[in-house]
Image (cartoon, rainbow, N blue to C red):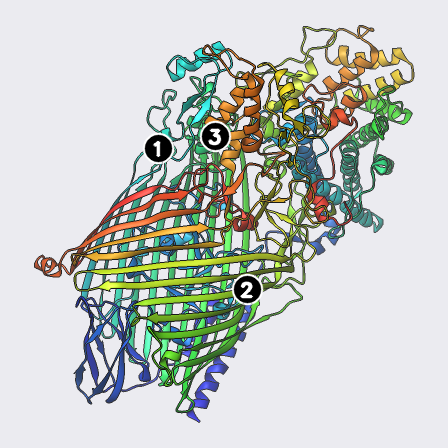
Amino acid sequence: MHRLLTRGTALLCLVLALTWTGCDLLDVENPNNLIEDELDNPAAATPMANGVEASTTRALQAILAPYSTATDELTWVGSRDAWQQLDFGNVDDPFNEFTDVAFPYVGEARWLADNFFERLTGFASEGASVGTELARVSLYRAIMYVTIADMFDDFTFSERTEGAPAIGPSNMVQLYDQAIDGLTASLANLEAGTDLHTQVLAMRASARHRKGIWQKVNPSVDTGSPLVVDAGAAEDALAVIGAVGLASDWKYELVIDGSVEADLVVGGISMGTETNDRLELRVGATYVQPDSDGNQIESVTFADVIDTGTVYPETDRAIMAFTDAKRTPNMTIVSEREMHLILAEHELASGNMDGFTTHVNHIRVNMDNLTPYSGQVEAQAMLNFMRQANLVLQGRRLSDHYRFDDPSPEWIPSEDALQSPGTFLPITVTEITANPNIN
Amino acid sequence: MNRLRRLLLASVLLLMPGLALAQGEITGTVVDGTTDEPVIGAQVVIPSLSLGAVSDFDGAFTLENVPAGTYIVEARYIGYRSTREEVTVPANGTVTVDFELSESAINLDEVVVTGAGGPVEKRKLGNSIATIDAASLETAPITTFSEVLQGREPGVSGLPSGGQTGEGTRIRIRGSASLSQNNEPIIYIDGVRANNGGGFGGGLNGGGSPSRLDDINPESVERVEILKGAAAATLYGSEASNGVIQIFTKQGSVGAPRFTFTTSQSAISYPEAYDANAGFARTRAQADTMSAWLGGSIQPFEVVEREFMEDLYETGYAQTYSASVSGGSPGITYFVSGRWMDEDGPFGGTEDRRLPTGASILAEDVVQRGQFTASLNIFPTDRLQFRVTSAYTDMFLKTLDSNNNIFGVPSLAQFSKPERVAFNNQTGTSAFATVNEAMQQVLEQNVNRYVGSLGANYRPLDNLTLDATFGVDFTNQQDTDVRAFGWNIDNFSSSEPNGSRDLITTVNLEMTFDIKGTLTNQISKDIDSQLLFGTQGFTRNTRRQDASGVAFPGPGFGVAGAAATEDVFESFTEVANVGIFAQEQLGFRNFFFLTFGGRLDASSAFGESFDAVFYPKVSASFIPSDAPFWRPLGPISSLRFRGAVGQSGLQPGAFDALTTYSALTSVTGAGIAPDNLGNPDLKPEISTEFEFGIETGLFQDRLGIEGTYWNRTVRDALVARQFPVTGGFRATQLDNVGEIKGQGVELGLNALVYNSAETEVNLFATAAYLWEQVSDLGGAPPIKVGGSYPRYRNYIIEGFAPGANFGAVLQPVDDGFLPVDFNGDGMPDSEAEVLDYLGGLTSDDARLPETTALVLLADDPNTEDALPGNLSHYLGKPAPDWSGSFGGSVRFLGNFTVNTLFEYKFGNYYVNNLTGAFRNRNAVIGRNTPEAARVERDYVTGGVDANGTPLNDPQVRLDALNTWVNDLLALAPFSGLNTIEQADFLRWRELSLTYRVPRDLVQRVRLRNLSFTLAGRNLAIFTKYSGVDPELNAIGRGGSTDGLDTNFLDGVEAFGFVTPRRFTFTMRMGF
């Protein structure tokens, strides 16, 4: 009896001890993150917009590195030879480690923009005052849609764990339309003359024009008629120039600085880090004179096509700004220069040589203090040159390589870029293996 | 703190003291029957009373308060046969009994604790439990606790990873039980759960990363018990499926104060294991420049070799001093020890460096550890014991950037090319930084760690014992990675020229409680029972705080806050686990034992939809040689069969179950972005293991043989599943969808070949066979270890061992053909076609082919499997089929002893020789091994005459092309090709010669004992592996923040320091 009592007492104490201590023990806190329910609060609108901006900035900084390396803008000088494959023009390799590393950031930014766009639209419909945030998210969303359409052959729009099939190469053009529609909706709710209105308007001009470029390089490259004519883009571009002032050299940039470097600079892939810090990449020899080690820039040498003894000022400025910024270079999204180039191309394609010359010279004379263009070189070559000089490192070059039949000097005959002009980046192996709807 | 108070109060409720009576005592000595030397630490017990004592430094013991009567008294010690004597204790009197123990190669009466709930003889356990007796390693060249484990037990692998001073070892027991969670075994120190981590915070560097295991003073360890898997570790619950290592520290014993003092002095050196740096000049001007810097008269295209890696060597030096005192009275015993070790390793790099004025080499390889331990045992009554243990470690490590790190010193030294040597580029690095710049970087770790416990043991009834242990393990770790202002002294590197500082503080607190009771009953004349019941739990809090700064305003600043760009990061994780357990052990006439029980576990890391998990166990042990029906069977003197089946688990990470968003800031302001996808159904993965074993002693137990077969299936395995990244969440999400299978055989042989008073010969051998397979990924895609980095080829793929390598192989070709396509027809070219092509090349345009359009790879071997593309050929696994050790000891001339140990791995053991791949193939930083340089020279020139003039001989180019394609071409897009190779090895790990000064001599100088040992470690390696060292690994002890990489980035050699040789002289004395 005594033994039974002792055993029972001990077990009772045990259960009491466990009950008493165990409940509290399992109650732990997570101060590191936000749980999803908290996104249902309109008070989160501003951080949501900021998050989409940050995510977009990070994605562009990541994808621009492999994209630009596949062009003549960046070249490999380091240890990681998958960059060299891009230099060679092996653009369509889903296993390329850099394309594959960058791809998820693009996917994330696209999804986040769509998800928060939907949430903010919901807030707005419920009467919350989130108009500015909604317009910002719409702008970043358009940037991502246009970037995806510009840089990839195909893409997929999955939802969390549910993989979606690829939309198909021929449907990529719809991404421009969705971007344009979103921007158009935003413009209706923005006050003209505000910075945000101008940014949105310029992005719409760019999207319309880039859609035209896409149609020149898809499904096959039309080198015989490479120029884009788009009245809507031209109208928007004129409106932007009117808003910012002629020759103001206005630019809308996604900014990275030291305060956000830790969040937005992705190790091993960001264009600034790889080029200016690690020295894995360098600006291509088309644009610069390397130093004696070959890893860094001694000087920018990209000469003007008319003033051949003069380094093109904007190229010089852009490359040096990029280099000086080390790990945190800003990325120009749209600019007054691009608006003039849209207009110049539209005029040239429309047969209006004077219009073409006017807009080219707005840049050359009024912004860059160069000899005006007056037919010294063939107009289409002039347009190609001006785009190369003024849009450097902005993610536009690969299409221009193709449509102007102006290949990168580093491409080798056996690789995609020369074998199959019009090849862009692929859906990469990380998505392919995770998404049962992708072959 | 509130929780802790409740725990303490709860324990008091359980431990109310009682009264007891005592009537007599037993005293005596325990000595070695062959040498008459006292046996220190032998257990002398009266099993029927559960009463015991431990012999002291003279082998003496006292059993007090023994009720008058006749008892069987038993003396036990590891390595000896247990001896029993019948003793009659008079009332209020003392009886003396002396024991002479004879050595035994097998000991079934050895008492173990871990996994059994309390002290129990091994004979009663159906599962295997390994023990390592620290005393047996006294003369071994051991400087860290990791080395205590290395090569001692079959199935327990130490993975050294690298040869930098202070570098830690990963421990694996029976391979890998998890695909996603930490595969390190859990560690207990005197019943307190301990930090089993390692590496640098934030994964600052792979090489030189320390292990928290090495914070433990190896001199303070009494013994180690190892549970190898779920069958044995069930009572440890949800984190025990990788096994449990419990460390028991030394305790005091009754007697006058006894002092020990030990000092070791070591010399450490790296062997010459690296290929020379080779290169050639392509022009006369370049050759003249090379001559100017390298000396001699170098001709164009002359392959020049230099040893830039070995220029970094020096002879390292280490010193260790340790001392202890122990003793006590019948009511209280104590043990106090201290140890100081200081090692300046074999990395030098300070001689003959060409440095700018005012600059010096800052990188060093230094480790210092101050370790202090104390234990106190208080016996207020014969039925009540209080235990207090404390251990404090202060550790400082200074090391250098290394391994797969472009700013690593050894990586840059190995990237170096003689043709690029210049005034401000002493070794001719091609990219990133010069070697002298890399040696301006300083990586340090400071650790303060305290492990302490309070314990109580109370025996309210003769057959009931209650025991409670409460403990904490607190680690404060600070890691710093510093580049001083102007660190790029050669003006080569562009990274952070104005300096940077990263400071990562990691504070880890683990709290343990363990409360249990043991009730013994004699159910019948033949059957006895032992019922165990209790509760155990722990909490683990880890707080990490990072501060970093880039760009100091000038030299001299040493704080992150002085930098132009500053950043902070903070994270906090907390895991709590609590379980209750019960176990019944039935014994039948002391030759058959049946144990069954289980643990019910709950954890804060389980998902909302999951409450608790129950882990059952059952085991049996049958010792026919102790049964009444046993008849002598040839040379067999003892025989045991055992079998066990049990479960344990591994729980997910602290917050893996939640859908979360993280902070992501834009220049406009604070923002939020997707973080963790979440899984409310998350639960622990369950490891079910069964094992069968046999132990036999032959020739009066002079030959012991042990064999175990084990089989493990992990169900609901946590798979870090990658969902479509276009779905918004980039990070993988844990999902209980996997299954892993493993099985193996462990063999041990121990032979006492000969012993006499003057001479003794002992031999041992162990072997462990391991087979593992990922049997199911539950529809999750294959997992590539190392992310998108293509040079790491380890994968988690269904049907293969975890971490198996996959990559490229060349397209098979017929004789007379090469797997190249220079004519662009998509088919392999014949030698004639190739010669024709090569004949058209000149030294200006000849360039080794490095695209898949020119060098043809074999197609995807299985287009239907989950791994797409042609980089999917199986190339071997990083864990060998067989591993083990063998060696022995020889005592001669009475006082001299030689010990040695060899360790091996063989059978399907493959290592990714990434060092060689880079150095052979890479056009920018490589092609600088002697063979690669010659191949490139020959391909470019087609051979040269005496003046260095190219001959353009196509046959020379063809020979070079053959070597290039078949031996050297590697890396993207040929990942895996010519890189992953067989790496079987036999390493002569330990050799020592010890002289024990005869007892009569040492007593003349009032010493108790005195010995001198000369020892060597890592003396030689025998292998066909062509790389630097098959034991190197890119990841180090835990340099990665990614659990997947830490688990399965195995067998990857990448720019680490070779395992050094160490020669140690040790003096030990006791007084």
* Relative height, residue A259 to residue B1009 (above, below): above
Q: Nearer the viewer, mark 2 or mark 3?
A: 2
Q: What residue did someone put label 1 on?
A: B313
Q: First in sequence, mark 1 or 2: give its number.
A: 1
Q: CA distance from mark 3 to mark 1?
A: 27 Å
Report, in whole angstroms, how far the alpha carbon at label 1 lies from the one at label 2.
45 Å
**Helix, strand or loop at mark 3:** loop
Q: In the rendered structure, which disc, 2 or 3, sits on the residue that comes first in sequence? A: 3
Neighbour tally class for label 3: few under 14, some 14-19, many 20 plus, Cα within 10 Å: many
For label 2, the residue is: B712
- Apparent side of residue A408 relative to residue B150 in the rendered image (left or right): right
Q: Residue at x 52, y 20 (%)?
A: B937
Q: Chain of mark 3?
A: B
Q: Are marks 2 and 3 on the same chain?
A: yes
Crowding near the residue tagged with mark 2, few <14, some 14–19, many ≥20 C-alpha atoms within 10 Å: many
| Residue B809 percent across, percent down from the top left | 61, 38
Question: Going from the N terminus, do you reach mark 3 or mark 1 first?
Answer: 1
Give the residue type that dot 1 points to.
Tyr
Q: Assign a secondary structure to mark 1.
A: loop
Residue B196 image position (x, y, % from top left): 45, 56
Chain letter of mark 2 equals B
Residue A386 spot, x, y in % from top left: 76, 16
In the picture shown, does residue A310 fall above or below B48?
above
User: Residue B499 got which mark?
Assistant: 3
Type of residue at label 2?
Arg
Residue toward you, A410 or B461 = A410
Mark toward the viewer: 3 or 1: 1
Residue for point 43% across, 38% down: B1028
Q: Between marks 2 and 3, how big is the CA–CA gap?
A: 51 Å
